[in-house]
Amino acid sequence: MLSIVLLTIGLWNASLEKSEKVFYAMSFVLSLFSAIAVQKNTRDMKATKTMEPF
């Protein structure tokens, strides 16, 4: 949560075009989504391996 607030403050004060600010914000949001997706997939794969009969 803190990283999102700091990114928002940084982009608000940055001397960039609006389109560049949106690009950086969306890149950050998508990177957060991908990190969570990888963590969930890794957890699910581990759970599936432990449930398989040998």
Image: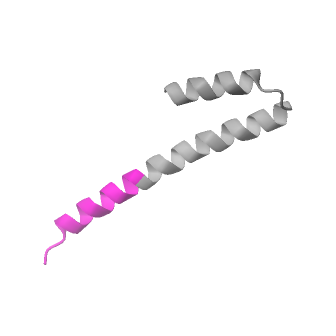
Q: Is residue 5 above or below residue 31?
A: above
- Judged from this view, the residue extending furthest toward the left is 54
Give the side of residue 47 with respect to residue 26, left or right. left
Is 52 a magenta residue?
Answer: yes
What percent of the width, then of the height, locates residue 9? 66, 21
Whole-percent x and y of residue 37?
Answer: 46, 51
Residue at (77% x, 26% y) in the render: 14
Magenta span: helix, strand or loop, mainly?
A: helix
Q: Residue at x 31, y 63 (%)?
A: 45
Q: Which residue is drawn at the image coordinates 67% and 40% (left, top)? A: 26
- Tell me which corner region of the image, top left, top right, bottom left or bottom right, holds residue 41: bottom left
Where does the C terminus fall, quadrant-wise?
bottom left
Res 38 → quadrant? bottom left
Q: Is residue 32 above or below residue 9?
A: below
Q: Is residue 16 magenta?
A: no
What's drawn in magenta, residue-wise? Answer: 39-54
